[in-house]
């Protein structure tokens, strides 16, 4: 098993990054919260094509969890994560401590206003403020040329893109497709919370997305009708409870009522203790 160099200290990470940049190499970064699965590893694999030095970070970021949320119980297994990253040939793991990332007296946050508001932002106040803040901090420390994110967290990608534009950050973002289990369930560290019956029930999200796509391909253009069908599909599954099912513009996430071009269908449902999200771009001619 190849060893995986790891850095925990912020100054050491900056020095590593400075050295690599000075040697003319491109740094590719994959930020994660750990408890890795094939979704994360797909980003790592794709990352190879975008530069010379591949850095993965593992940091369960406390500021993106509300006090009532699952920060304390969020699954962690650093030893296993290190093995997986080493097997993928990652060059460096950066895993800072929360005490170093948010030392006493910490008080600066990034608020990406409008695109953070709908969907998950409406149900998890402060979540995207935590996400934007930690991503900016990680970028300032690791100083990547390119960073990869998963489209499973579609709104997160849009929030980060907007932040980079607005704050003139010179990092290229690559968004990668959602990796799914054989039954269509999007891979997620939180799937760990699901019991066997709940795990089977979780497939209702993807079924609802597929149903919507079929309707739209069949000519349905009214967002309300598509939404009704999606809600009905999820309600057939008694273990699932919908948090939101919204159709919106894929760029600014504004709600749409008529489907005239590519349209984002974003879903969130609770199954047991797991809050699951999934999405698909609907639209004529879309795969
Ligand atoms: P997380 O550890 O949940 O913060 O995720 C780290 C990165 O992996 C984020 O960019 C996620 O969007 C991405 N990711 C998580 N699950 C998947 C998946 N099933 N497919 C593709 N990317 C994913």
Image (tube, grey):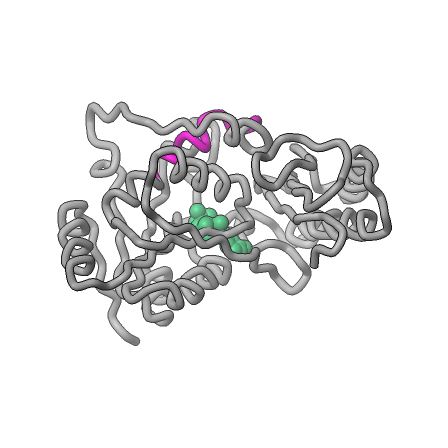
What predominant SS class does the magenta segment belong to? Answer: helix
Q: Is residue 126 above or below residue 134?
A: above
| Quarter of the image that includes the C terminus | bottom right
Q: Which residues are magenta?
A: 122-134
Front-lying residue, 162 or 139: 162
**Which residue appears farthest toward the bottom when viewing the image?**
1
| Residue pictured at 22% horizontal, 59% vertical | 6
Q: Is residue 129 magenta?
A: yes
Front-lying residue, 259 or 266: 259
Q: Position of residue 95 (x, y in %)?
A: 27, 50
Q: Is residue 77 above or below residue 100?
A: below
Residue 106: image quadrant is top left
Q: Is residue 217 above or below residue 273?
A: below
Q: Is residue 278 above or below residue 244?
A: below
| Residue pictured at 41% horizontal, 34% vertical | 64
Q: Is residue 280 magenta?
A: no
Residue 67: image quadrant is top left
Q: Position of residue 174 (x, y in %)?
A: 45, 54
250 lies left or right of 238: left
153 lies left or right of 17: right
| Quarter of the image that includes the N terminus | bottom left
Front-lying residue, 73 or 222: 222
63 lies left or right of 26: right
| Circle count | 0
Q: Position of residue 30 (x, y in %)?
A: 37, 55
Q: Position of residue 123 (x, y in %)?
A: 56, 28
| Residue pictured at 67% horizontal, 58% vertical | 184
């Amino acid at each position: 098993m190849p060893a995986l160099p790891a850095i925990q200290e912020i100054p050491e990470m900056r020095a590593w990054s400075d050295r690599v940049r000075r040697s003319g190499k491109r740094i590719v970064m994959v930020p994660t919260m750990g408890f890795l699965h094939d979704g994360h590893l797909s980003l790592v694999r794709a990352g190879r094509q975008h530069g010379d030095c591949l850095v993965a970070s593992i940091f369960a970021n406390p500021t993106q969890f509300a006090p009532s949320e699952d920060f304390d119980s969020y699954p962690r297994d650093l030893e296993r994560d290190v093995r997986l990253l080493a097997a993928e040939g990652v060059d460096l793991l950066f895993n800072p401590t929360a005490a170093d990332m948010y030392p006493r007296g910490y008080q600066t946050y990034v608020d990406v206003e409008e695109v953070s508001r709908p969907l998950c932002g409406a149900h998890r106040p402060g979540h995207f403020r935590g996400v934007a803040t930690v991503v900016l901090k990680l970028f300032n420390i690791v100083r990547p040329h390119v960073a990869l994110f998963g489209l499973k967290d579609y709104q997160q990608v849009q929030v980060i893109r907007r932040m980079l534009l607005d704050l003139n950050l010179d990092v290229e973002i690559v968004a990668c497709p959602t990796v799914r289990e054989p039954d269509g369930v999007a891979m997620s560290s939180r799937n760990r919370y699901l019991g066997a019956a709940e795990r089977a029930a979780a497939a209702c999200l993807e079924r609802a997305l597929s149903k919507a796509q079929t309707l739209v391909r069949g000519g349905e253009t009214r967002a309300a009708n598509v939404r009704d069908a999606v809600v009905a599909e999820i309600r057939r599954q008694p273990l699932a409870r919908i948090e939101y099912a919204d159709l919106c513009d894929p760029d600014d996430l504004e709600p749409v009522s008529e489907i005239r071009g590519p349209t984002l269908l974003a879903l969130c449902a609770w199954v047991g203790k797991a809050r699951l999200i999934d999405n698909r771009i609907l639209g004529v001619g879309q795969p």
